[in-house]
Amino acid sequence: MIKLTDIEKIYRTNTIETTALNKININIDKGEFVAIMGPSGCGKSTLLNIIGLLDAPTGGMINIDNQAVTSLSRKKLAVFRNLKLGFIFQSYHLINDLSVIDNVELPLLYRSGISGAERRKRAMEALGKVGLGARTKHYPNQLSGGQRQRVAIARAIIGNPEILLADEPTGNLDSAMGDEVMNLMLHLNKTDGTTIVMVTHDAHMAKKTQRIIHFFDGQQVS
Amino acid sequence: MLRKKYYTALTLIGISLTIMIIVIFASFIDQIVSANKPEVNRDRTLILDKLSIYKDGKKNNAGPSINFLQKNIGNLESTEAISYFSGTGFISTLNGKTAGHMLTFTDGNFWKITDFEFTEGKPFRSEEVKKGTRVAVINEKTKSYFFNEKEALGKDIAIMGLSYKVIGVVKSATPFSRVYADVYVPYTTDANIQRKNKAIEGSYSALLLAKTTDLRKVRAELRNNLRKYTFSEADSVKAHAFTALEQFSKSTSADDAEPQYGKTAMIVFIILTLFMLIPAISLINLNVTRIGERAEEIGVRKSFGATSGDLVGQLVIENIIITLIGGMIGLGLSVYASQLLVHFINTFDPLFKMETDSFIISWRVFGFCLFSCLLLGLISGVYPAWKMSRMNVIYALKGGNNL
């Protein structure tokens, strides 16, 4: 499903060259739930951003769903992200000016041929899946951290993406809420067959996934 | 918009004040040049109010006399009707109060070329003009002043010591128009006609209603006719006849050649652009700041598949909506601001007071206001939107931006 070949990311300034990722080769199968672990600054989030096509690698090839995406134009990348990928961020990144249901609908706004009524229906279904069907008219700042992350998950899954990319999704939550969110992702992986790549610091959460990839200083160590 | 009240209020104030001034400016120009009632034929009505008199190699610009007009331009074949008129003022005292009134001496054709709405009575006819009958058509403001809303027809008003019978009441023309007056009377009752009007020079003007909108024909005929005549007081005479729009927009008035518009049009365009540019730059700055505040939102939208085009479209539309709201507020404000302006102007001439509703907002002005809003929205929205579309997603998601 995801094939990374010799991925490099080097940040250059006038005086310093920093290698964030060094020749990374990873294969992730369809339906797999993978955790990426490592200390801060080891390149986990950079890798996730590259898989999510939010950042471009300095070198190497990315193949997602048998498509070489490295050479796609900005516009095609945007369409690809919209159709294939869903994002869950540590700090939720909900739009505070929009209600819960409007936040969840957002990915479908950029997909052609979906009516307003259809968007609303699918948003309700997604919110139902995360157990927030009764909070549709609330605004993000009226919700708890766990509820916000569940809204973010609903937003990530509304477009039925094949891949979910989660960047420390439980990092801002207490253990009970973290477990709740983790169980939700495990459920999505099991029932919908969604491929999930999760960056985490939390070994307890990582153990619940099918595979753990360890990173250190921009390199894959296991 | 509602959640960022300070930003929204600041933006709306800027836009509404700009649009308010543009609307007043546009309303003024609209009343000077457009085909508004009663000057519905403005596109084919020429105003001849200036002559160039050449004598012994010297040129002297002056207004024409009624004798000159009647003798030399009274028979232009390219015109449908010609009217002569002269404006002056008179003072009246009523119940201890003194007021000034604009007075126009004119003829029967005046009412054919113009389209005044008579709320009472009728205009004076050519026979009454010929006989020098002392009859008057007054506007509603004058009726209200002299007769306090009661019936005015058949009553007498004193004009310069002479008594005139009111035979008609009209709705006022705009005070910015050449045909505006409070009272209209036959020119044959003008006691000063001989004293003020020498053989060529005088205080009269002519309205020439052309048969078609090809005004070059009228001017060519006028030039040809004047070349044929000989004048005892001058070697040659050139007459300057232009429409209200030409009068406003041409580069020079002391010339009988076809009007040139380039320079004036350019000046008007530059003034308007500068006027729009200053608030537009402020709005651009505000929008760029606002984009910084919305960096996270932009990052989220991009992550979930928004293209640069989607984001540009979103911001431009948002900006146009806020500009339109500001424009509508500006339009409302312009009504009050124009009345304030009239009060201010009236303080300079307390005798000849303008009516407070002198600035009329026509559909044309409304359309121009709408156009200005869209232009302002586009100018101030496109550049920030373009910058926004170049924002790096990773930086944006961190709440900063790399603009």
Image: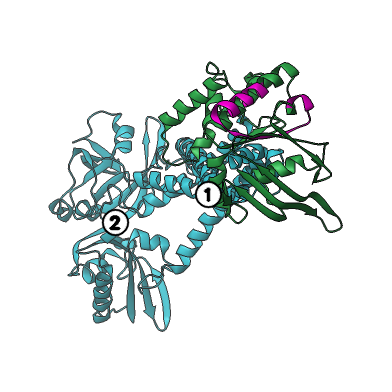
Chain colours: A green, B cyan
Query: B215 left or right of A161?
Result: left
Is residue A191 rendered magenta in the image? yes
**Number of dots carrying numbers:** 2
Q: Nearer the viewer, mark 1 or mark 2?
A: 1
Tell me the residue at 63%/26% (across/down): A185
Query: B364 left or right of A154?
Result: left
Q: Mark 1 highlights which residue?
A: B309
Whole-percent x and y of residue B227? 27, 80
Whole-percent x and y of residue A126? 52, 25
First in sequence: mark 1 vs mark 2: 2
Q: Can see residue B386?
A: yes
Instruction: Compare residues B102 and A89 and report the one nearer the observer.
Output: A89
- Measure the alpha-carbon separation of dots 1 and 2: 46 Å
Q: Can see residue A53?
A: no
Tell me the residue at 22%/30% (across/down): B151
Is A33 above or below relative to B237? above
- Answer with the quarter of the image where residue A212 lies: top right
Residue range of the region highlighted in magenta in the rendering:
A181-205
